[in-house]
Amino acid sequence: MSEQERIQALLQAGKITQQEADLLLSALEEGDAAAQQADQNISEAVGQAQYAPPQQPQGLRWARVKLTAGQLEARLDPNIQTPVVEGPAEVQQKGADLEVMPETTGGSLLGGLLGRVGSLELRLPPGWGLEVDSKAAEIEVEGVAFLRGRVAAGNVELKAVEGLDLEVTAGNIEGSLRLHEGQHRLRVSMGNAELDLLPGSSVRLEANVSLGNQEIRGFDRTAHGTTRQLGEGRAALEVTVRVGNLEVRAR
């Protein structure tokens, strides 16, 4: 079932009003439009680059969250054994992983669109990663082992996240990473990225801004062109901003 069909089903079931359905469909269309417009603008300005996806971490189980609009807060909780979902959501087990889709009930949609009511909170135990597919939402992630997926339109805030493979089409991303090993990537088509590498991180950084400003602080230069290194450089981090500004700091 597509997102549009799901909204129509909720409307027919009487769980949302026509006005709420129209607003949700509008948010969905705006997210798609932002993604298409950003890709078109960048393709015309600097061309379409091709990227090979980084190698995914082994041994993690995944909580997969699909958002149309609203707010998601996800954090590591070392005191639990299984993920805990707080807020109206449909939760399904998919093999070893978990699929989470926020439910839209009467009165919650407008608040969800405004980021006040109907937001979703997710607590993950150690050994779990978070995968997001978001059209237009605000996302906060703290302490999780790995964050991957796509945000079409919206902002992302990170705090001590230990792995990253994320694409932001139109929006901003800021916060802190703690990277020790493995491959990591951030792609921002249109927006700004501000990242702090926390103490203990060991990173080889490849950073590129096509149209905008770039500032890298606290890294050592290497003999390999644009590559910067922090510590022994055991983890590889690629950050690309097509239109916008990039700031990466080693703490």
Image (spheres, rainbow, N blue to C red):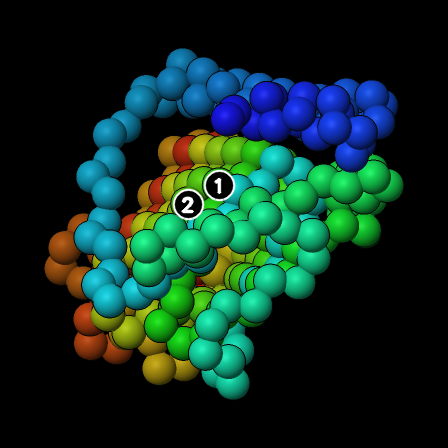
Residue 248 on image: x %, y %: 44, 59
Q: In the image, 94: left or right of 117?
A: left
Residue 111 locus on image (x, y percent): 82, 44
Mark 2 closeness class: few <14, some 14–19, many ≥20 residues within 10 Å: some
Q: Which residue is mark 2?
A: 149
Mark 2 residue type: Gly
Q: Using the rendered image of the protein, determine whether residue 66 is visible from the camera's viewpoint.
A: yes
Element at label 2: strand
Residue sitting nearer the eye, 100 or 134: 100
Residue 96 vertical placement versus 48 (above, below)? below
Could you tell me how far apart the alpha carbons at marks 2 and 1 are, in whole angstroms? Answer: 6 Å
Report the amino acid beneath label 1: Asp
Of helix, strand and loop, which one carries label 1?
Answer: strand
Q: Is residue 116 above or below residue 29?
A: below
Q: Is residue 42 left or right of residue 172?
A: left
**Residue 165 circle label:** none
Residue 199 horizontal/vertical position (percent): 41, 81
Q: Which residue is mark 1?
A: 133
Q: Residue at x 35, y 82 (%)?
A: 200
Name the quadrant containing residue 58: bottom left
In primary-sequence order, the first of circles 2 and 1 is 1
